[in-house]
Image (cartoon, rainbow, N blue to C red):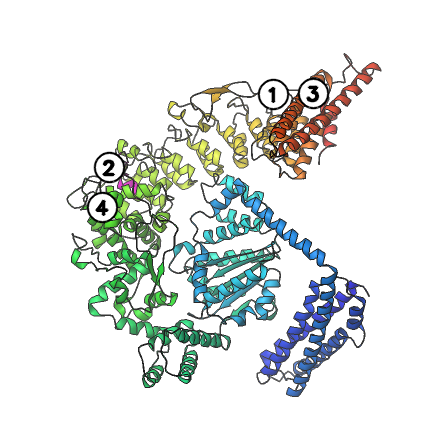
Amino acid sequence: MDGLGAAASVIAVVQMAQAVGGALVEYYEGVKSARDDIQRLYNSIKNLESVLRSVDDLPRTFSINIQASLENKTGTLSLCKAELDGIKKELDAFSKQQNHIGKLKSLIWPFKKKDVDKLVDFIDKHKHDLMLAFGVENLHISLRHHGILEDIRSEIGAARSEIGAAQSDKERSQIIKWLAKSLPDPSTEHDIARKKFQKGTGSWLKDGDSLKIWSKTSNSFLWLNGGAGAGKSILCSTVIDHIQEFCKQEPNVVVTYWYIKFDDSTTQSISNIIRSWIKDICSNRRDTPQTLKDTYALCNHGQQQPTHEKMMEMLKCVVGGFQDVYLIVDALDEYPKTDRYLLLKTLKEIHQWKIDSIHIFVTSRVEDDIRVHLANMSERNVFDNCKWIMVQDPNITEDIKKFLAAKIDSSEYDIPTSDLEEEVVESIARRADGMFRLAALQLESLKPYQTIFEIRKGLNQLPRSLDVFYRRALEEVFEGHQCYVKIALQWIAYSARPLKLVELSEAVAVQTESSPYLEEDRKLICKGDRFPLVDMIPSAFVTIHIYESGDPSLPFKEKSYIRFSHYSVQEFLQSTRTSNGPVKQYHLQESNGLESIAARCIAYLLYVGSFFEDSYSGLPDVHNRFPLIYHAVLCWTYYLQRLEILSNGSFNLVGNLRELASLLMSGNQATSTNHDAWKISQIICKDARRKIPYSATTLALAQYSFEIEIDSSIYIPCPLSWASHHGLISLVKLLLRDALYDISPSNASREFDLGSPLHAAATGWYFSERIVTLLLAAGMNPNTSGGELRYPLVAATDKNKLEICKLLCEGGANLDPGWGVRGETALQVACRKGYVDICKYLLEQGADIENCDFADDVAKHDFLDSLMTPLLLATKHRKLAVIKLLLVSGADIEAVYNGYTPLQYASEAHDVQACKWLLDSGSDVNHMTESVPFLTLEFPWRFRWTTSWTPLSRPFRVYPSFYPNDDLLVITELLLKAGADVHAKGGPWWKNGPMATTIVFCLECTRNLPESTEQREKHVLKKTLDMLLHAGAGSGLEGAEVLSILGGRREELKEERRELLRQREMNTRRSNDRIEEIDRFINSYDDAYNRVQEQQEKERKVSMRGVSTGDGVENEELSNGELSNRVTSLSL
């Protein structure tokens, strides 16, 4: 029997074990009286199955002795199979009997306890025999193949070296940096969880079958669920460490994880989760997939973030080639419920890709929406797939006991006797109901007790639930502190980022009723590292963390920040359980909390403004005097924006918040009440924007720590533009109603980024349509210039906002109003970006399809896309849908920019479909670029001359990102079939070189390819060269000239090689890489030279025999049919 036969026998026993296991599951559910016996037998058979599966780790060829001992009639495998077969028949017989009778409500267990004992002993004995047999075989294999292990270690080392080399690649580094932009570091939360981990806990999960099977099963999904405070995050961190340790010697395995935190909105983002996964996986790859490169380029080379669809494409691509990819997410239930279905849908989509290497692990409480979504992840039986694991007794109780014992031993607690310690541990573990959080609070409540009597009395009075604990803690807050505590709880719950203690201590003292908004005698006096506010808030509610950063320029010496100690705290404060009763004053509602915080931020700005008036000399170190200033400046817009989003744009400014906002935004001039607060806030915000991405959310979340730079020439945006851009409908209405704005053209144009209110609204992200409607109704001119993109219609087009484009056009916007920052009209922007719907609409409205006028105020820009017609732009940027629309609409196919036609741009971009359409439309296949002047990027005011190109030579124009592919072959074939002249000259290609034909351009490409170029790409260039030669590139009189150029270039390269050799002799450390590169290049020229020479020789012989036509040269005017046959025969 061969190795395959042995493996097949093992598989047969495994299948029988699975069948018996499935039958036992059925009996377990139907026979309650025998569940212990069923569970023992099930576990024994599953352990046998696990041992049998280890055969997958052995070679397919077993030793002769091992095969014989396993396969003969008295061998282990045969005996195991026979015993399992007997068990299966017995179970099936009773099951069929029950089905036949049809009267029994439950199954009848066919085995007595002693029978089960014998079966378990029999199976365990043969399991150990198998383990011994496989162990002996593994020993022989190890001794025979020690050298192979050394090779494997070498391969692992080589793989790691390749990954390290890939990580140093510049483009790769830029892509990873782009993916990591503004991402929180999940390792921070992981470290916090590991610090809470108690040695010895979680072993039931780490060593259990469920996790093992999940980690080895293809396309597996595992959900760990449990109640509040059950320690799920700590268990998740245990799983992460276990899988990382398990896989650390595997270079082809990657683990990536994410912790969702209820009080950190940056962790509550699907985009952040997926980008983090892509970043981690890509960092462990040996290469950078082309999909990532393409998406990076599509997103303006990292200046924009990809769409959800693009991120999913990247994730699906980047996992390819890995043996295993572990995706781990903690605390799904802490993701906002309103958007949670999107996260669950994303996880389900990933699972439904059915990629074998992906393993997903998530944790959460059993929320209804989570349960429903995850229940249908797989059709396989839960016992085999291990989809769900519930954190429950008895496993969790034992972990809680270990946790309590360790806490007591840490000298924090003084319990007189060891017997009492055991009593405390047992009593609390029994009452904790599986919640670490409740157990910790119960133990903490015993701290004040000193005698055995007091401790036992305290044990009997322990609260039985978290609610009781939290309610009791709030009832004990001192009356004089209640106002501070209520405000502090609002800030902790809804602040844009966790607050530092010094910030929160300042925030709770701000009042919003009238000026002064912060009185010195209301401030909490902080002495050194002690903050009175910490003592006022119940200790069970909050924890203090230390902000760890390597940045020595942080503005606050104090690095502590405050957060809720557990998700259950915020849930309790927001629940209906606190809306009535003795603690109702602490009840939290998000809208009320955000209004309160926003009002206090604005009041604080007005308060700070009163200290500066027109003098800004103290601004650079303003944070030293006013600790809350950064948060107030960068976050007040964010809080109002959140209110607008929560109310779907129906939020109304009322009361103190309305009055404060009116004061802050009442124009740009200081008054007796606003004291230049608007200017000061914008100076700080403007300075932050130079260092932090510009949006209300990113500004709010930033740990802004830079010293303020005062710019005397700074332009302060008008409040209406600010409110319009950030989607603050309530503020826009307020400003329009009370005429608190200046919409003169000079004011609209002075702020480069935001510009006019309409321009600002068009570039915003929230409620743009409604705000544009309000502004147009108020009489705003849609043709007023100002802002980064100059005109509202151009700005709306740039953001792909079709509905706003329609509103502006209906409001009288000029379709060709002038020039944006790139000098483009709205139609040109839409064509460049590929927004086909907007292109279609603008053309229907009468936009000029050939507009490409030159504007004096644009000449200073490096990017002169304004000089290109819409069709030229679309072909240059490969926007196929737009190209098709423009061709149908009658665009000029021979329009020229810098001497280049649309066909030349399409061929350069290797855009096969665009080339087909343009050729079918009649484009000139032999258009020669004229030598015309154009502005250089290095020296915008100097002109240089373009190189001459034809559509056939244009595809060989080499950029750093040039990678030959099959498209190059197809385009070359298309152009040759369409009559492209293979003898047309362009160039010069190299310094002082001659004008040359396409064959030379093709050869020169090989030198510019990076060393890492795949063999396939080199093969493409070789086949392209073959195609050109078969099309006659080396024939006729022009062929003789080509031969001369090839020979001359070859001699130049040889001279360059000799010079390198001389340099190497002078410097022995010099690398041989360049010499090897030139050797390869010379060989390419040698091969081409010889082939052209052979072609010339054949023509000479034909001419001498009198077969050739005309002057003895082979007919150069090949018919389309002949050329087509030649080219097609060479296609890949």
- Residue under numbered circle 4: 664
Residue at the spot 67% in from the left edge and 19% down from the top edge? 1048
Magenta stretch? 708-722
Which residue is painted at 51% across and 75% down in the image? 395
Q: Are marks 1 and 4 in contact (CB under 8 Å)?
A: no
> What element does badge 4 sit on?
helix
Q: Residue at the top extreme?
A: 1111
> Going by the picture, which residue comes out furthest to the right?
1105
* Residue 666: x %, y % from top left: 21, 43
Amino acid type at circle 3 is Gly
At label 4, counting other C-alpha atoms closer than 10 Å, the crowd grade (few under 14, some 14-19, many 20 or more) is many
Callout 1 secondary element: loop
- Work out how far the residue at label 2 is from the one at label 4, CA to CA, in angstroms: 15 Å
* Image vertical order of residue 27 relative to residue 516, above or below: below
**Neighbourhood count class around disc 2 (C-alpha, 10 Å): few under 14, some 14–19, many 20 upward:** some
Disc 2 designates what residue? 742
Residues at circles 2 and 4 in contact by the CB criterion of under 8 Å: no
Eye-nearest disc, 3 or 4: 3
